[in-house]
Amino acid sequence: MIQSPGKTYSRKQRWLHWLMALMIVSLLIAIEIKSDFPKGDPRISQLVEWHKQAGLWVLFLVWFRLYWRYRQATPQILPPLSLAARAGAHAAHVLLYLMMIGIPVLGVLFSQAKGRAIDFMGWPVPILLDESTGLPYALTLKTLHQWLGNAMMYLIGIHFASALFHHWIRRDNTLIRMLGGHKPVADRSFFQTTIKQET
Ligand code: HEM
Ligand code: HEM
């Protein structure tokens, strides 16, 4: 049964959003800075390992997030967005969810295709593609993983900028819904001036 919407996302949705955001940002930083270290430096493999483990955590947690997303109605944005803006935001969110699933799966596939065993917190991840069948596809899968991973970076940048746009320029409750603030929208000075001007 779908629960009726609150003023903000539920506590568990908010925690999961920020925890996973932190993980994704850290795994991207880890893979980006690894090339700053000299070849053979043991920190390189530590950074890659962090990248993989955080990526697998994302793949594990995203299912809980989707479950809660469809059990609970999304809190309303006030003042309401135009249909086009709502469609754009929805498309970006769907894309982010698909990336949180597709990119780590591609990471596992290309690693296994190269013959590297993957574990998640010490537990072996089932072989989805073994070396004997997967090797010819390894490079394509890796390129796809890197390309989509880089595209996700840009999408997160846009997502971040639009959250700030909503908060500071449009001055609606979009970000507050994800932060869990309790300030009613009507308390925000911009609305008071806008409402006064309009009446
Ligand atoms: C949300 C999850 C993930 C994202 C967003 C992501 C993103 C990326 C990006 C952007 C790069 C390439 C950076 C560059 O050189 O341009 C990369 C490289 C890599 N990823 Fe992921 N990744 C994720 C999960 C995983 C997982 C789960 C694995 C394996 C189990 C994995 C394995 C790797 C490896 C081994 C590389 C290094 C390739 C190399 O330079 O040789 N990734 N990833
Ligand atoms: C870094 C990785 C991030 C990912 C993968 C991500 C992903 C998502 C997704 C999928 C949603 C849709 C939630 C839903 O309705 O199911 C969402 C909502 C939201 N995110 Fe992020 N997010 C990230 C980072 C951030 C950052 C850094 C900010 C803020 C500055 C932010 C602010 C928000 C806000 C305000 C919402 C609510 C938007 C709305 O309901 O229209 N996110 N995020």
Image: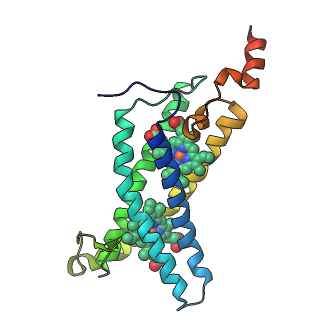
Is residue 144 at least partly visible in the picture? Answer: no
Is residue 70 at least partly visible in the picture? Answer: yes
Where residue 179 appears, x then y in whole percent?
A: 58, 40
Q: Is residue 82 left or right of residue 148?
A: right
51 or 14, nearer to the observer: 14
Where residue 54 appears, x then y in whole percent?
A: 45, 65
Identify the image quadrant of residue 153.
bottom right
Q: Looking at the image, how many numbered discs can be counted on the residues?
A: 0
Residue at 29% from the left image edge and 82% from the top image edge: 115
Identify the coloring: rainbow
136 or 85, nearer to the observer: 85
Q: Which quadrant, please, contains the C terminus?
A: top right
Where residue 22 appears, x then y in whole percent?
A: 54, 57
Residue at 34% from the left image edge and 63% from the top image edge: 105
Answer above or below: position of 199 versus 154: above
Answer above or below: position of 51 versus 77: below
Q: Which quadrant, please, contains the N terminus?
A: top left
Answer above or below: position of 54 versus 134: above
Q: Is residue 79 left or right of residue 123?
A: right
Where residue 26 appears, x then y in whole percent?
A: 55, 64
Q: Residue furthest top?
A: 199
Residue at 55% from the left image edge and 60% from the top image edge: 25
Residue at 52% from the left image edge and 88% from the top image edge: 42
Identify the image quadrant of residue 122.
bottom left
